[in-house]
Amino acid sequence: MTEEDRRNLDELGASVVRYALEEECWGLRPRVPLSSWPPFYSIARSGFLLGCESDILLLLLPIESPSTNVGCCNYKCSCRSNSSPNQDIGSFSIDASCPSEIRSANHYVILDLFSCELNSVFGAVQFSWINLSRNLLLAYQSFGVVYGDLSTSPLYVYTSTFVGKLQNHQNEDAIFGAFSLIFWTLTLIPLLKYVFILLSADDNGEGGTFALYSLLCRHGRFSLLPNQQAADEELSAYKYGPSTQVVASSPLKRFLEKHKRLRTALLLVVLFGACMVIGDGVLTSAISVLSAVSGLQVTEGKLTDGEVLLIACVILVGLFALQHCGTHRVAFMFAPIVIIWLISIFSIGLYNTIHWNPKILHAFSPYYIIKFFRETGKDGWISLGGILLSITGTEAMFADLGHFTALSIRLAFAFVIYPCLVVQYMGQAAFLSKNPGSIGRSFYDSIPDPVFWPVFVIATLAAIVGSQAIITATFSIIKQCHALGCFPRVKVVHTSKHIYGQIYIPEINWILMILSLAITIGFRDTTLIGNAYGIACMTVMFVTTCLMALVIIFVWQRSYLLAAAFLLFFGFIEGVYLSASLMKVPQGGWVPLVLSFIFMVIMYIWHYGTRQKYNFDLHNKVSLKWLLGLGPSLGIVRVPGIGLIYSELATGVPSIFSHFVTNLPAFHKVLVFVCVKSVPVPFVSPEERYLIGRICPRPYRMYRCIVRYGYKDIQRDNGDFENQLIQSIAEFIQMEAVEPQFSSSESSSLDGRMAVISTRMVQSSSSLIVSEQEDYGMSTTIQSSKSTTLQSLRSAYDDENPQIRRRQVRFHLPPNPGMDPSVREELMDLIQAKEAGVAYIMGHSYVKARRSSSFLKKLVIDIGYSFLRKNCRGPSVALNIPHISLIEVGMIYYV
C-alpha cells in the first residue's frame, strides 16, 4: 500500500468512523476518545481492519454499549468475556498482539466502511455469507484475467490436432478418440493437478514457479540471493506454511544444500520455466488473434490470407500500444466478454451435440483413447502436440493466485470453465464426425449461420482478453526475475493507483510486440504457431510438477513415496505430451526454444556479473578496526549533513567509502549505510521493511539501514524515504538506550546487531515532533543549505520547475526532562544534520575480468555484462534517488 493509498484510507476511515461515533447515529460510544486514536491506517494494521478486498472494507470496532440495534440489520451485539483472551471472533482471534483498546473491549461490531452498515461480529451465518459473496465476486473477476487464454483454445485445438499424417485418419473413431483425450487431459491436469493440489501450495497467497521456489528456499538453504541474514527469517511472511522446525533433516535436503551446483541447477530450472512464460507472452498474442481473425475467411466474401494477416497485425499493434493505459481501465469489460464467450461456446456445443451426433457422449469412456492409439499409432502420438493446446493457459490459474483466492479460482473453473469447455469440445467433435472436411476450420464451420457474426466478434474480443492476461503475467515475471538478481534493471510503470501489482514495462512491451509481429508474419499459420505454443506451455507445467514434488517433501513434509507418486503420475502424462510436441521442433517448435535460450543467456550473464561484483565488495570490505583506530572524526573533516551510502552489503563497510575519503578527506557528520535487498518472500509489510543498526560506537554517528523487499513488492517513489529514515533512526536511538540487548552500545563488535523499526511504532512514537508545510518556492530550501554552490544549483532547479510542490518536514525534540543527555545530544545531531541536507553516495562501477581470466569469462564480463549495464536503467534511477543530491564514486572492479 502506497503513502497516497494510506492517506486516502485515513480520510475515508476517519470520515465514516467519526460520523458513526460522534453523531451517535447507531447509539454507539467509543471506548477511547477519538482525539487520542492513532491514524486510521495504524489502527487497521494493528488488528482493527478485518478485510480489504474488492468493495468490502471491514473494521472491527470496540464499543461501550452493552446491547445495540445495529443499523437496519436489527442484529444485537453480544458480550464477550475477557476471561478467554484467545476467544475466536468469527474467524478472527483476539490475542496479546492486539492493541489494548481491542483486548479490553467487551463488545464488538463490524463496520462496513463502504456501505456504512454495521453488522454484529458474532453473526457467524452472516459473516460466512460475506466470505462466500466475496469469493463469488472474485470468481467473477477471475474470468477476465485468468481464463481468457484457456477459454479461447477451442478456436484452434482440432485444427492443430488433425494435421500432417493424421489427415489420413479423419473418421468418426479418430474424432471420438481425440475428444476423449481432450476430456481426460482437462480432467487430470487443470482440474486434478492445479485446482485440487497445486492451488494449496501458495506462498502467502501467491502462486507460480517463483512462489514454489520461494517456499523451497525458506524451508531449505537453496537460495542463491546475496546478503541474506538470520533476521530475514523473522519476517511474518517468512514463517508462512508448515513449521520449518524439522526434527531430522532429510538426506535429500542435506545433499541439495551441500552442493552449490545443484542449487544453481534448481535456479536455472526455475528461470527456464520463466523464460517459457515469456515465450507464452509472444505466442499467445499471435495464435489467439490470428485464429480469431481467420474466421473472416469462412464468410461468403472470403478474404485473402494477406488481408487477414494485415488485420491481425493491426490488432496486435493496437493491443500492445494500449498496454501503457493499464488493464484496470478496461477491466470492467474483460469478465463480461469472457462470460458471454463461455455462454456462446457452451450453447453452440450443446446444439451441435444434439443436432449432429449425440453418440459423442460415449467418448467420455477412456476406451476410445486406447482405440484411437490402436488405429493411429505413431501418428496419434505426434498429434498429442495439438491435443495439449486444450490446456494452454492453465498455468495462469496458479500464477495469478495472488490477485484472487484459491476458493474463487476453484469455483470459477469447476462450475463454469470446465463444463463449458467440455461441452464445446464435445459439440465440435459431434459436428466433425459428420463433417470431416471442415477440420481445417472446425470452430467457425460449426457455428450456426444466424449467430456467426456475433460469435465472431465475441471470439475476437475474447482472444484480445486472453492475450492481455499473459502479457501482464510476462511483466510480472520480468519483475520477479529482477528481484532474484537475474534480469537487468528496467523501467516499471504502475498503471493503477488502487490495484497493487498492475505494472507496465515499456522495453519488454515493445520487444514482445516486435516478436509477436515477426512470428505472425513469418508463420502465417496457426498450426505452426501452435506447435511452438504447445512446447512453451507444457515445459512450464513440467517444471511446476518437478518443483511441486520437492515442495511435498520439504515444505509439506510428506513422505518420499507421495512425492514420487505425484511426480511419476503427472510427470509421465506431461512427459508424453512434451515428447510429442518436441517432435514438431522443425515445424515451428524451435521458436520458444530459441527465445528461451536468448532470455536465459541474458539472465545468466546478469546474474553471474552481479554475483561477481557482490563477491568483490564482500572480500574488499573496510576493516572496522581501521575505522575505530581513526577515532570518531575518522581522521577527516566531518561536515554538516547526512550521507546515505548505498551498497549491496548487509554487513561491513563497502570499499567505496574508503575510496571516497581517500580522494576527498571530508564526509558528513551523520553516515547511514543503506542496503536495499530482496528476500525470498512475495511481500514484506511496511512494519517489517526497515532494519536499523549501528556500525561503530555512538560518537561516530554511523548507522546502517537495510530496506527489504519481496520478489513481488513494488518500489514506489513516495518521496518520504528520508523522513521515515530519520524517524526510524531516532526510534532506534531511544530503543537502544532503554532495551537491555542494546545497552552495550560502546562495544566495538557492533556491526550486525539490527532492530526492526516498524512504521506504526514510528508514527505512535514521541521520539521526534514532526511539523509539515507545503512549499512552492525555494527560499526555505536554500536557506537550510550551508553551501553557496548547492544554493545556486537548487535555485536553478527551482527556476526550471516552478510548479513542483514539495512537502517541507521539520523535526523537533519533545520537552522531556527525563531524557538521557547522551540520547538528547545524538538526536539533536541527527536533526541538525537533516536540516543541513541529505546527500546520496553511490558507486559508479566498471566491472572488468582479470587478465588471468579465461576467454569465456572475459567474453561474459567485458562484453555481455558491460553491454547490459550500459543499456539498462542506472541504480540511482531504479532507487528513485534525486539526481541533484547524488554523488557517484568511480571504481573499477576486477573480478
Image: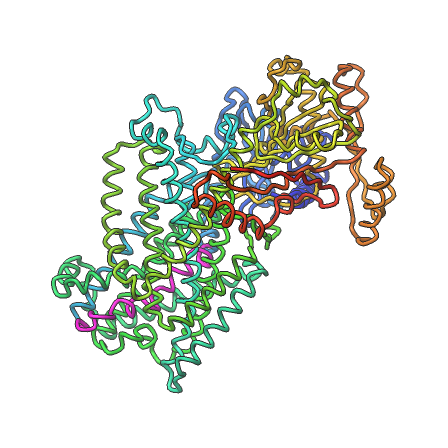
Q: Position of residue 418 (x, y in %)?
A: 33, 57
| Residue 130 seen in this snapshot | no
Looking at the image, how many numbered discs can be counted on the residues? 0
Write the residue at 21% across / 69% down. 358
Q: Say which quarter of the image contains residue 443.
A: bottom left
Q: Is residue 156 magenta?
A: yes
Identified at 34% across, 48% down, the residue is 194
**Above-or-below relation of 177 to 601:** below
Asked whether 591 or 740 is in front, the reply is 591
Dominant SS in magenta: helix
In the image, residue 764 above or below residue 281: above
Compared across the picture, whether 193 is left or right of 729 comes to left
In this figure, which colouring scheme has been used for the structure?
Answer: rainbow
The foreground one among 333 and 648 is 648
Q: Position of residue 555 (x, y in %)?
A: 36, 33
- Find the residue positioned furthest to the bottom: 301
State left or right for residue 351 relative to residue 58.
left
In the image, which residues are magenta? 142-171
Q: Position of residue 316 (x, y in %)?
A: 49, 69
- The residue lying at 27 percent from left, 77 percent from top is 438
Name the quarter where the N terminus is drawn: top right
**Which residue is pictured at 33% across the width and 30% down the height?**
253
Residue 787 position in % (x across, y down): 84, 37
Q: Quadrant of residue 446?
A: bottom left
Q: Is residue 702 above or below residue 199?
A: above
Of residues 131 and 107, the one drawn nearer to the viewer in this rendering: 131
